[in-house]
Image (tube, rainbow, N blue to C red):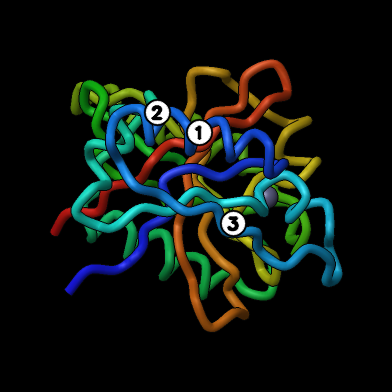
Amino acid sequence: MTSDVTVATFATRSEADIARARLAADDIASRVVADDEGGLNPGFYRRYGVRVVVADGDVDDALTSLGVERVVVRRPLLDAMFTHAVAGHPAEACGLVLFEGDAPAFVCCLTNVDGSGHRFTIDPSEHFGALRFGERLGWTVGGVFHSHVRTEPVPSEADIRGGADPGWLHFIVGPVEGTRQTVRAFRIVDGEPSEVWVSVVS
Ligand SMILES: [Zn+2]
């Protein structure tokens, strides 16, 4: 069975149409889908509301055609993020992602010292502990994760302003109170987020 898969998201329909034209030039059929704007937080949807979708058999070719960065995440790492997100509710949960080379190897579930449902700050001593733990195993901190309690897992203005290390991947899971929890990953460079395709393997 085939289903449609989102391979890129944009703020505007014209950007999505450009991506669609690039795919068409590579003989890959795609559609542009505009998600509902509005709700309680129109800003999120304004930035990421227009999606380019392809048939699931065309995903790899489409990502290559669009030059989309990919990251492979093992399912247990994702489960750890979701479990921590639920445990942290109603505050945002957070942690660090240790990488072996360019692949996530371990998720450190840490404390959000803000205790807030709208923002997070990783406990500094736990942050240091995670660094030391990784060093012993030859892993480096390559990313950070946090949960969104009610909103879609895309960077908030606070996430973008607090962008930390531009080399990090920012994983966001949620919405914890929603019926369809998912994970998305972004790089945030100079205040500009760009989405990284998350490939989940068992
Ligand atoms: Zn956030």
Q: Is mark 2 within 8 Å of ligand 1?
A: no
Residue 163 spot, x, y in % from top left: 67, 28
Residue 95 spot, x, y in % from top left: 49, 47
Query: Could you say which disc has been placed on residue 46 in the image?
Result: none
> What residue is rendered at 67% in x and 44% in y?
155
Badge 3 marks a residue whose secondary structure is loop
Return the residue at label 2. 66
Q: CA distance from mark 2 to mark 3?
A: 22 Å
Comes first in the chain, label 3 or label 1 = 1
Q: Is residue 48 above or below residue 180?
A: above
Which residue in the rendered view is the most extreme toward the left? Answer: 202
- Identify residue type, mark 2: Leu
In this picture, residue 75 sits left or right of residue 152: left
Comes first in the chain, label 2 or label 3 = 2
Determine whether label 2 and label 3 are within 8 Å by CB. no
Which residue in the rendered view is the most extreme toward the bottom? Answer: 179
Residue 146 spot, x, y in % from top left: 56, 52
Task: Name the residue nearer the viewer: 143 or 130.
Answer: 143
> What residue is rendered at 73% in x and 60% in y?
115
Q: CA distance from mark 3 to mark 1?
A: 22 Å
In this picture, residue 12 sits left or right of residue 39: left
Return the residue at label 3. 153
> What residue is rendered at 33% in x and 58% in y?
78
Q: CA distance from mark 1 to mark 2?
A: 7 Å
Q: Is residue 169 visible?
A: yes
> What residue is rendered at 62% in x and 19% in y?
189
Badge 1 marks a residue whose secondary structure is helix
